[in-house]
Image: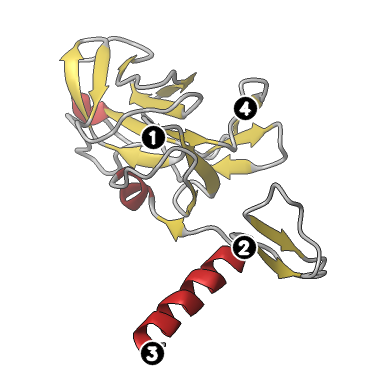
Amino acid sequence: MPTKYFVFLLFLFCGILSYGQVKIGDNVSTIDEASILELESTTKVLVLTRITNTQMLSLNPLPGGMVYNTDTNCVYSYNGANWVNLCNSSSGTFSFVDNNDGTFTINNSDGSTYTSSNLTGPQGPAGVDGVNSGAELEQIVIVAYNKQTQFNTPFPFDDSRKIEVYRNGVRIDFTTINTNTIELESDVTCFQNDSIRIVQIL
């Protein structure tokens, strides 16, 4: 029998006998017949791909793809159209605390907290249009719906420099639609239950 036929038959025979299952970790000799991949360990963990929000939004993986977003410190899953923040739950609640020092703290029902930087506003004699450090602030936190880009401000405004917008704690740019509505920058789209905080200097 020629060598090339022998090698072909050997590969064909091995292909028939091979299994499409992999188990990593403890008890590698047992795997559920419905599993393609099983991980089992009492001392080690699976670490997802760790990327920034910008990197995540530039990806378009198969539905079910998962990443750990290092900007929001949350796990996201791709549903075929959008990235879904798995840290946020429609049943989750939060409280908002004014620390009376220019900072604000958001306490989430899962025990995590976020404290803002000092949002006292422009400092010095001039500030924005003469506003001094004693400026009054008003802010709202909105739980966004999927693909939402427009939001109402706490009060009507005539100077967009007196407004700051944060999505899940990360400051983002916006454009003015009218005296009471802003729109997030063109490359930012909200996912279901994203937290949008609008801070306005009065």
* Mark with earlier residue (2, 3): 3
Q: Nearer the viewer, residue 77 or 170?
A: 77
Residue at point 39%, 80% (across, down)? 5
Disc nearest the viewer among 2 and 3: 3
* Mark with earlier residue (4, 2): 2
Q: Which residue is mark 3?
A: 3
Residue at point 32%, 43% (across, down)? 60
- The answer to whether the residue labelled 2 contacts the one labelled 3, judged by CB atoms less than 8 Å apart, is no
Name the kind of residue labelled 2 in the image: Tyr
Q: Which residue is mark 4?
A: 89
* Mark with earlier residue (2, 1): 2
* Mark with earlier residue (3, 1): 3
Residue at point 41%, 57% (across, down)? 51
Judging from the image, what secondary structure is the residue with disc 4 in? Answer: loop
Judging from the image, what secondary structure is the residue with disc 1 in? Answer: strand
Residue 125 lies, with reference to residue 189, above or below; the image says: below
Q: Which mark is residue 166?
A: 1
Q: Nearer the viewer, residue 61 or 38?
A: 38
The Cα–Cα distance between marks 4 and 3, rounded to whole angstroms, is 62 Å
Q: How far across and how far down the image is residue 144, in percent?
A: 44, 20
Disc nearest the viewer among 2 and 1: 2
Judging from the image, what secondary structure is the residue with disc 3 in? Answer: helix
Q: Which mark is residue 19?
A: 2
Q: How far across and how far down the image is residue 20, in percent?
A: 59, 59
The Cα–Cα distance between marks 2 and 1, rounded to whole angstroms, is 49 Å
Name the kind of residue labelled 1 in the image: Tyr
Q: Quadrant of residue 47?
A: bottom right
Name the kind of residue labelled 3 in the image: Thr
